[in-house]
Amino acid sequence: MINFILTCIKYPINRFVLRPLFKTDPWHDYPYNHKQYAVDMVKFINHDKHILDWDSIVSKDQYIVEVGCGRGDIIGRINRVCKGKFGYDIDRQILKIGKMFHRNVKIKKGTFSEVKAEEISIFIMVNFIQSIPPAELKGALMELMQRSNIKLVVLDTLKLQEGSPYQYAHDGAYLLPGFEMVHHSKKYQTKFNADRRIEYWMRK
């Protein structure tokens, strides 16, 4: 109920104030509280005490990084103690909003190739990778891992249904050799005829 109420409050602000002001894509009209997979992801990373050993994953000497961060709604709400948080996105306009609302994140224009942190506890890439061919995405990740030591990767996979506009449904085992899936979420029905699942892949 609380997420529904917050969505009703925030959607008109995003739609009729922030979109015209910053000329953002209509997709960003829907607030964080409308995206249950995002709410559950943040809750799991912040509060899980039984499934993963977060004390061994997150370190004060390592960073948390999200590529495709948009407004920073996910990484901005992660409160695990770390050296710092970086968010990257290619949409310069939406990043302006992110910098306004999530000052605890260093938000920058860029994608995988701009990530420079050498030690990363958690690396997040959700809700945009479905537009990238698997071989291209794997190549970007392999290049990133040549300069960055990453412990845990969080990504979303889709089970496509007939009529879905998504281009690619990725396989974490293909994208992340040397990693193993240690947890996954329930399935979330997207409005574009696909089932989304959040997966957590740990370096072996």
Image (cartoon, rainbow, N blue to C red):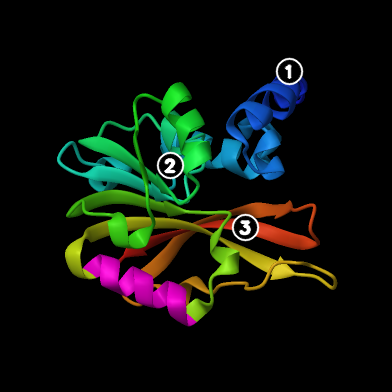
Left or right: where 117 falls relative to 157: left
Left or right: where 120 falls relative to 101: left
Q: Is residue 39 above or below residue 88?
A: above
Which quarter shows the N terminus?
A: top right
Whether 108 is among the magenta residues is no
Residue in the image at 28% along x and 66% along y: 144
Q: Is residue 39 above or below residue 121?
A: above
| Residue 9 tag number | 1
| Residue 50 tag number | 2
Distance from the alpha carbon under mark 2 to that under mark 1: 34 Å
Distance from the alpha carbon under mark 1 to that under mark 3: 27 Å
Q: Secondary structure at mark 3?
A: strand
Give the crowd class for mark 1: few <14, some 14-19, many >=20 residues within 10 Å: few
Q: Write down the residue under mark 3.
A: 197
Closest to the camera, between mark 2 and mark 1, is 1
Q: Secondary structure at mark 2?
A: loop
Residue 52 in view, yes or no: no
Residue type at mark 2: give it: His
Q: Earlier in the sequence, mark 2 or mark 1?
A: 1
Q: Which segment is the magenta one?
A: 135-145
Q: Is residue 77 above or below residue 89?
A: above
Whether 139 is among the magenta residues is yes
Which quarter shows the C terminus?
A: bottom left
Quick one: 151 or 103, which is closer to the camera?
Answer: 103
